[in-house]
Amino acid sequence: MNLRTCLLTANSCYKSGKTIVPRGVMVHSTGANNPKASRYVPGDAVIGYNTGGNHWNQSNEQWLEKYGTKLSKCVHALIGKFADGSVGTVKTLPWTMRGWHCASSGNDTHIAFEIGEDGLTDPAYFAAVYQEAVELTAYLCKTYGLDPLADGVVICHQEGYQRGIASNHGDVLHWFPKFGKSMDDFRAAVAAEIEGDNMLTEAQIRAIVRDEVAAVEAERAKLPASDWAKPHIQEAIGRGLMEKNTAGTIDRPQAGTTRQELATVANAIYEAVKG
């Protein structure tokens, strides 16, 4: 996921300050042939800049003055093309803020994002935004403990309408099937993404084992000599086979012995026997 943040703080939705406890994710698409993320946010050097003044970081009053109607919409994120042509996600609202995205009760329960549409004929662009949407949805489901395969958790706008929690829009069922994808496919992909994130790689497993071994060795190194070993340690020191520390004993009495330490002791024994 290629995530940047550009909060729409001037939007009247943001200013309302209402919050939700997320119970799902609703997938939308913009319904306009403009895949640039900067169409909907002021932008920056990475996202690209909005040059038309028609971004959503404006209040109802500003929008009414410009266009004669209110800007009664605001989602939590937008997926589209960045300045370099790559696909990414722009976070536009805090995830727990109540959005204005479906004109019904779904606003109270679902985090929502828009996918910027193109001409709906480019398989490369569709594949890129589809994967970005999968990764974003997986991230949100993990963040809020949501099961993407549970009923009503991950839905599109049209499915929200069918459930009576969203207005009557067709997205994204007018687009996904053009490329052989359904919302069931999408939910399965989100679940697989989460499962994949939960699976450890061989390198991660090896790192965990190394850390555990090091921790065990560190704890053993802190332990004092056992009572039965103390006289043997003193005898070895007295015979010059081991070096004593400032406390008159040896360091790390119960730690593992390295080959170099063993070689040093063996050589000392050999010299003592030879002498």
Image (cartoon, rainbow, N blue to C red):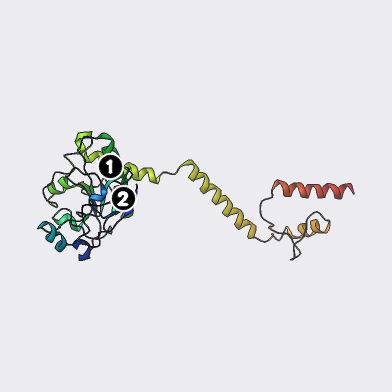
Q: Residue at x 83, y 56 (%)?
A: 240
Q: In this view, does 270 lie to the left or right of 6?
A: right
Q: Which amino acid does label 2 sit on?
A: Ile
Q: Which of 114 and 220 is in front in this view?
A: 114
Secondary structure under tag 2 reads loop
Q: Which residue is drawn at 75% across and 62% down?
A: 245
The disc label shown at residue 161, or none: none
The disc label shown at residue 129, or none: 1
**Where is residue 198 shown, x and y percent of the image?**
39, 46
**Where is residue 91 shown, x and y percent of the image?**
29, 54
Q: Dots 1 and 2: beta carbons under 8 Å?
A: no
Q: Which amino acid does label 1 sit on?
A: Val
Decide: is 172 above or below 40: above
Disc 1 versus disc 2: nearer the observer: 2
Secondary structure under tag 1 reads helix
Q: Which residue is drawn at 12% across and 61% down?
A: 65
Q: Marks 1 and 2, Cα distance to the nearest angstrom?
A: 15 Å
**Where is residue 147 shown, x and y percent of the image?**
28, 49
Q: How crowded is mark 1: few (under 14 residues within 10 Å), some or many (20 or more)?
A: many
Residue sticking out furthest to the right: 275
Dot 1 or dot 2: first in sequence order is 2
Decide: is 247 above or below 160: below
Q: Which residue is identified by label 2?
A: 47
